[in-house]
Image (cartoon, rainbow, N blue to C red):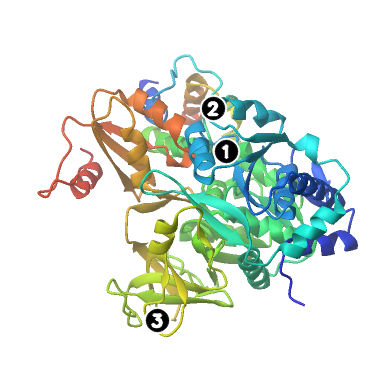
Amino acid sequence: MQITNILEYLEDTVRKIPEKTAFSCEEHSLTFTQLYNESRSVGSFLADKGFYGKPVVVFMKKTPRAVSAFLGVIYAGCFYVALDEEMPRHRIELIIGTINAEAVICDDATSELIKEYGYGGDVYLYNDIAFSEADEAALASVRDRQTDTDPIYAVFTSGSTGVPKGVLACHRSVIDYIENLSQVLGFDGDTVYGNQAPFYFDAALKEIIPTMKFGATTHIIPKSLFMFPIKLVEFLNEHKINTLCWAASALTMISSFRTFEKIVPEYVKRVIFVGEVFPIKQLNMWKAVLPDALYVNLYGPTETTGVCCYYKVDREFGLDETLPVGRPFHNTSIILLNDDNTATPYGETGEICVKGTCLTLGYYNNPEKTRESFIQNPLNSMYPETIYKTGDLGRYNDRGELCYVSRKDYQIKHMGHRIELGEIEVVVNMHKGIKTNCCIFDDVKKKIVLYYTGDATRAEVAAFTKEKLPRYMFPNVIIQLENMPYTPNGKIDRVTLKNNYFEGK
Amino acid sequence: MEKLLEILEGLHPEVDFEIADDLIDAKIFDSFDIVTLVAEINAEFDVAIPAEELIPENFNSAEAIWELIQRLDEE
């Protein structure tokens, strides 16, 4: 019978290979038995407290125990919201406020931090709740009430109004995603993942869930290694890592420093890139040292549970070409729509829309934004059929492969993250010394450029953004202007700013 | 050195690079900064920093970075 709860993956695996390492990091590692016991203990605790169907924040360092906290939340029939100690306070408060959290699970490192934030709910220390006997009756009762359309996590993405949106995914969409992804990428019990993606994004699910499904192993790579490519490759070799599902920028970091002249990954057989376009020049360097590896480009927004399309690199590309997005996973379908909601003729450019089980439930506590993006398929007036409008423009090439063209709006992809430039502008505007500001994106050098007018110094603006925004949203260049250029109808003239920028003015 | 300080100030206007000596250890720099910095050093000083020089010791202070540039320039 088809599974209806992602925890069944773990429950099946723990019976077969109880003593194998599931997750490891610098500090500790967990076998499947430990993962199973600790997550059921956390789940029992939350269930006994009466939490069900509610958001539970997991505010822990990125370790295997954070994973068992996530699973514990799911065992209680709740959904988790992962926060990271490196997130700025402002964003954490926004997220906690948006979901109106009543319970937060902390570790020793974060339990002090949370006290300083504007949060008045319960705080539980992982170590206090993860090592008790599981309450079998309570867990069985939760499982009995659950359906596969119940949510299991909320992932927050950038929102143009300055408030991040919580994308809510359920068991069924995650199962659909993992089953189809695993088939395409050939994951199995011998897979050894080197995790790069932060846990507060759905990108990490590519490793976390298949690790449970196949009884594989995930090594969490220390973040600092991504500054030092030789040490990073040494880490991959030491842990016999064979599968990389990384942001393209992380892969580029290794190849662009000519690391391969000194050291080569010895075990890697799958190189999967997500989040942004992987430059052909860099791809070719990887292919030169690992000619037999599988190279796959993944595409898709968080709203379609992880990713929805893939392209297996099957030919050579010129340096001026970009990799296609490819085709949808099994059980997912892509529709291209024009602005007037008619079907885009084959070969022309239209908005990429997605349908299928992969669709998430929508945005938590935000029916308005949900209605804007999760809409009735305009090509079908006969029965309810929801599609998700990605805001990405795409078209099919001569080979029938879907290709990404550009965004419809001011959303950008930067360091593997999806960012609304408007969100940065809203935050910068909160500074007293700022009159006006506007962000543009230098898509050649991949820099966020902030223009502003006002009395604030550049150092003040920089310090302010660092307090309020996640790292990947910091402006890389800050330029103070006497006067902001405007268009005739009174909007900030982004085109002039961009032209001036590229002309070096 | 002045040109280098200018590049560093562009990356982190809030840091006093004349004093700071724990740029890596205090997590002021992250991988994005390092990648940007290496590219700008390459463009400004025509010095390519090889992977084996990408170690924490070479990037903890402006002075250390400057020494690295000079050393690579002489080679």
Question: Could you say whether the residue bearing mark 1 is in a helix, strand or loop?
Answer: helix
Question: The disc numbered 3 marks a residue on which chain?
Answer: A
Residue underneath mark 1: A227
Residue underneath mark 2: B59
Disc 2 residue type (three-letter): Phe
Question: Could you say whether the residue bearing mark 3 is in a helix, strand or loop?
Answer: loop
Looking at the rendering, in which quadrant would you find the C terminus of chain A?
Answer: top left
- For marks 2 and 3, give the one nearer the viewer: 3
- Residue A5 x, y percent position in the rendering: 72, 65
- In the picture, the disc for residue A394 is none
Asked whether the residues under the numbered discs 1 and 2 touch, taking CB atoms below 8 Å apart as contact, a structural biologist would say yes
**Residues behind callouts 2 and 3 on a single chain:** no
Residue at the (61%, 36%) spot, across then down: A224
Judging depth in this view, the residue of A251 and A458 nearest the camera is A458
- Residue A308 x, y percent position in the rendering: 53, 68
- Residue A102 x, y percent position in the rendering: 62, 40
Left or right, A260 with respect to A71, comes to left
* Mark nearer the N terminus (3 vs 1): 1
Residue at the (40%, 57%) spot, across then down: A369
Marks 2 and 3 sit apart, C-alpha to C-alpha, by 48 Å
The answer to whether any part of residue A265 appears in the image is no
Badge 2 density bin: few <14, some 14–19, many ≥20, Cα 10 Å: many
Marks 1 and 2 sit apart, C-alpha to C-alpha, by 10 Å
Residue at the top extreme of this rendering: B19
Residue underneath mark 3: A398
Looking at the rendering, in which quadrant would you find the N terminus of chain A?
Answer: bottom right
Marks 3 and 1 sit apart, C-alpha to C-alpha, by 40 Å
The answer to whether any part of residue A462 appears in the image is yes
Question: The disc numbered 1 marks a residue on which chain?
Answer: A
Disc 1 residue type (three-letter): Met
